[in-house]
C-alpha cells in the first residue's frame, strides 16, 4: 500500500460505463488503475490533470482509496470491495473513510452497504467522489482480488473472519443448499432447472432463492453449508464475503465460457469445486441475448453432480429431465416479465429447443 500526498482527482469522465472509464489525476499515478482478468493494463484510463484550471474540494483527513463503485450486484461484490482490506491490515486506518468513484452516478446500493458493514464499515464512512477533490493523504492499496483474476494479498481470505464471526455468527455446519434461478427465467436460467430442484430436494438439499434474502442472511447460509450447488449467476460472488468458511461448490453452467468465467474465483477460495459446462445452446423470448436461458445436457450435468455430491440415482432420469425442460420452456414463454410474447417468437423457440433435445432422448 502506498500513501499519496496532495493528490488531486476528478470523478469519472462523463458517459462512463462498466467497460468505458477515464478519470484525471495529478499526479496521474498508475496505482489508481483498475484491473480485471489478471491483465496488466488498467480498464480505467488515468489522464493528466491541470490543477490551475480546476476548483477542488479539499479532504484533509486520511482516506483509503476504494476505487470503482458499481451498481450491478455481481460487479459490486467482485470489483468494489477488494480495496477494503487496509481496514484490517493497517491499525492507523481502522476508522478511515473510503473514497469511491461511482460508475454512471450510481448510489451506494443496499447490498454494498451490507458488504461494507460485514467489514465493520458504515455507510457514513463512504465518500462518493462526484466533484474534483484534493486528498491530503490518500492510501492506495492494490485490488486484493480481481474480477476473474488472481488474489494477490497473502492471507486475504482470512482477513474477514474475525469481523464475520462478530457480525454473522460463527461458521460451520452441514447444510446442503441449491442456489436457484428458478424465478429468474425472464433474465436467464436453464431449461430443466425444475428437475434439478426436485432431485436435490429429494436428497435433503434446501432450495435457496437468493432474491428472498438479504446479503448478510445469504452469507450466513453459505458459511453454515458444507455443499452449495449454484445455477450459474451473480449469487456466486456472495462466496467472496464468506471469509475462509467457503463450502464445496458445484456450478451448473448456463452460458458459454462458464468454466473460464468462474475458475479464477473458485480455484482461489474453494477447497473443492466443479463447474459443469454441458451447454448445448442459449435461446429465449427476449431480443436481448443476455437474457436467454441455457439448454444444457441435463442428464450429463446430473451425472456430474451425482459424482461431486455422492447422490443416489433417481429412476428414469432422461424422461424426467426432458419433461422438466419442456415444462420450464413453457413457463419461460408465458412469463409476463418477458419483453415480448409474440406468437411467432414462441413458436421459433419451441422448434429450436425440440430440435436440440431430440438428440438427448436416445
Image (cartoon, rainbow, N blue to C red):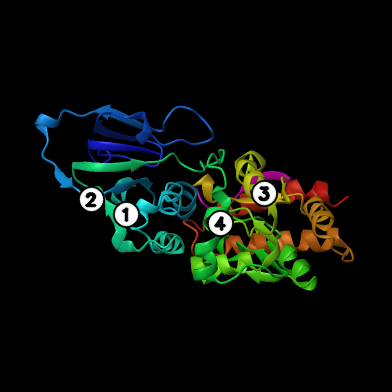
Q: CA distance from mark 1 to mark 4?
A: 57 Å
Q: Which residue is mark 4?
A: 343
Residue at the image point whose x is 16% and y is 28% from the top:
50
Sequence order check, earlier mark of 3 and 4: 3
Residue at the image point whose x is 28% and y is 50% from the top:
105
Q: CA distance from mark 3 to mark 2?
A: 46 Å
Q: Is residue 355 above or below residue 229?
A: above
Q: Is residue 205 visible?
A: yes
Do the CB atoms of the residues marked 3 and 2 lie less than 8 Å apart? no
Q: How many marks?
A: 4
Q: Which residue is mark 1?
A: 96
Viewer-nearest residue: 244 or 12:
244
Q: CA distance from mark 2 to mark 1?
A: 8 Å
Do the CB atoms of the residues marked 3 and 4 lie less than 8 Å apart? no
Sequence order check, earlier mark of 3 and 1: 1
Q: Is residue 174 above or below residue 92?
A: below
The N terminus - image quarter: top left
Q: Quadrant of residue 222?
A: bottom right
Q: Is residue 101 visible?
A: no
Q: Which residue is mark 3?
A: 253
Do the CB atoms of the residues marked 3 and 1 lie less than 8 Å apart? no
Q: Which residue is mark 2?
A: 61
Could you tell me residue 151's position as x and y percent? 56, 41
Q: Quadrant of residue 313?
A: bottom right
The magenta segment: 278-287
Dot 1 crowding, Cα within 10 Å, few <14, some 14–19, many 20+: some
Secondary structure of the residue carrying numbered label 3: loop
Could you tell me residue 24's position as x and y percent? 25, 32
Do the CB atoms of the residues marked 2 and 1 lie less than 8 Å apart? yes
Amino acid at each position: 500500500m502506498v500513501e499519496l500526498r496532495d493528490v488531486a482527482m476528478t470523478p469519472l469522465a462523463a458517459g462512463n460505463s462498466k467497460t468505458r472509464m477515464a478519470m484525471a489525476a495529478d499526479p496521474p499515478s498508475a496505482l489508481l488503475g483498475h484491473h480485471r482478468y489478471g491483465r496488466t493494463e488498467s480498464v480505467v484510463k488515468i489522464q493528466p490533470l491541470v490543477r490551475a484550471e480546476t476548483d477542488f474540494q479539499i479532504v484533509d483527513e486520511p482516506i483509503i482509496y476504494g476505487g470503482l463503485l458499481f451498481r450491478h450486484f455481481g460487479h459490486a461484490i467482485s470489483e468494489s470491495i477488494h480495496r477494503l482490506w487496509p481496514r484490517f491490515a493497517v491499525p492507523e486506518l481502522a476508522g478511515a473513510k473510503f473514497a469511491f468513484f461511482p460508475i454512471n452516478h450510481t448510489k451506494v446500493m443496499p447490498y454494498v452497504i451490507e458488504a461494507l458493514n460485514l467489514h465493520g464499515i458504515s455507510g457514513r464512512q463512504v465518500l462518493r467522489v462526484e466533484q474534483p477533490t484534493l486528498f491530503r493523504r490518500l492510501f492506495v492499496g492494490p485490488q486484493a482480488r480481481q474480477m476473474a483474476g488472481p488474489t494477490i494479498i497473502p492471507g486475504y481470505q482470512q482477513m474477514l473472519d474475525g469481523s464475520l464471526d462478530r457480525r454473522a455468527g460463527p461458521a460451520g455446519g452441514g447444510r446442503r443448499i441449491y442456489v436457484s434461478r428458478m424465478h429468474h427465467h425472464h433474465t436467464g436460467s436453464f431449461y430443466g432447472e425444475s428437475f434439478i430442484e426436485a432431485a436435490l430436494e429429494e436428497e435433503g438439499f434446501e432450495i435457496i432463492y437468493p432474491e428472498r434474502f438479504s446479503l448478510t442472511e445469504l452469507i450466513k447460509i453459505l458459511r453454515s453449508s458444507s455443499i452449495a450447488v449454484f445455477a450459474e449467476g451473480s449469487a456466486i460472488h456472495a462466496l467472496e464475503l464468506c471469509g475462509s468458511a467457503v463450502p464445496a461448490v458445484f456450478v451448473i453452467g448456463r452460458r458459454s465460457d462458464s468454466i473460464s468465467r468462474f475458475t479464477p474465483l473458485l480455484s482461489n477460495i474453494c477447497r473443492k469445486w466443479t463447474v459443469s459446462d454441458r451447454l448445448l445452446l442459449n435461446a429465449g423470448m427476449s431480443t436481448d441475448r443476455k437474457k436467454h436461458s441455457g439448454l444444457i445436457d441435463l442428464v450429463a450435468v446430473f451425472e456430474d453432480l451425482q459424482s461431486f455430491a455422492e447422490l443416489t440415482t433417481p429412476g428414469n432420469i432422461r424422461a424426467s429431465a426432458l419433461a422438466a425442460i419442456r415444462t420450464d420452456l413453457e413457463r419461460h414463454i408465458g412469463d409476463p416479465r418477458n419483453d415480448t410474447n409474440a406468437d411467432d417468437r414462441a413458436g421459433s423457440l419451441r422448434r429450436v429447443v425440440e430440435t436440440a433435445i431430440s438428440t438427448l432422448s436416445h
